[in-house]
Amino acid sequence: MGTRSKVTGSSPHHSENHSVERIGWLRAAVLGANDGILSTASLIVGVAAAEASRGSVLIAGLAGLVAGAMSMAAGEYVSVSSQADTEKADIAREASELQDNPEAELDELTGIYVGRGLTPDLAKQVAEQLMLRDALGAHMRDELHLSEMTAARPVQAALTSAATFAAGAALPMLIATVAPEWIMGVAVTVSTLVFLAMLGAIGAAAGRAGMAKPVVRVTFWGALALAITAGIGKLFGTVV
């Protein structure tokens, strides 16, 4: 009879790769690249709409690239560090509770498994076995919902955000450099929407999700941001 077990060669194990394993760096990478493209392009389009020279536009864009990359790195580091501090505090509190009142912690873990559908007797057996092997690990996973895959990594998030912001910002900067000055704003706008759509598709593919909604979502908000900044640039450029 056929089998549904995926066995390769002599290995009896079934290896699977899940998107949740990439959620930390993927979120930071997509956010950084999206912000880099959109904020820099909006700045370029806004300054260009004010009828500034190409040199002024590129200086503004470069300043936005550097400032944005540093801001993203600092913001991600502070934010994810706060998350990491909270996780460490919860783990320390759980370790203390396990030491002070292990029976209550056993009952708590048993209740979690009963809530997931196990009978009370089986739930208690499972809780006892897991706590015998690694009590803190069991409570981290099933009570606190913490694991190695989803743990906060401040340095990784900061570096990823800064690098992807700079890479994203370089795209509209390149277009502004090579496009004829009289259509620079239009060229940056159109190319930015294409870049954003591509980023939405890449992020969806990396996360193994559907592409249509992410692409439409990121393109719509990108177009809105570009339109607003172009309008402001045009208004102030005319006033000046």
Image (cartoon, grey):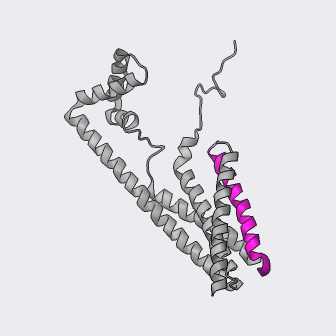
The correct choice, above or below, for 135 with respect to 35 in the image is above
Q: What secondary structure prevails in the magenta region?
A: helix
Q: Where residue 64 appears, x then y in whole percent?
A: 58, 74
Q: Dividing the picture into quarters, in which one does residue 169 lie?
A: bottom right
Which segment is the magenta one?
Answer: 180-207
161 and 135: which is toward the camera: 161
Q: Where residue 233 appears, x then y in whole percent?
A: 64, 77
Residue drawn at point x = 49 percent, y = 57 percent:
156
Q: Dividing the picture into quarters, in which one does residue 62 lie?
A: bottom right
On-image quarter of the C terminus:
bottom right
The correct choice, above or below, for 100 with respect to 230 in the image is above
219 and 58: which is toward the camera: 219
Q: Dividing the picture into quarters, in which one does residue 103 lie?
A: top left
Most extreme residue toward the left, as rendered? 100
The correct choice, above or below, for 99 with respect to 239 in the image is above
Query: In the rendered image, is residue 186 in sight?
Result: yes
Residue drawn at point x = 76 percent, y = 71 percent:
187
Q: Where residue 23 appears, x then y in whole percent?
A: 54, 47
Q: Is residue 183 left or right of residue 149?
A: right
Residue drawn at point x = 46 percent, y = 63 percent:
75
Query: In the rendered image, is residue 37 in sight?
Result: no
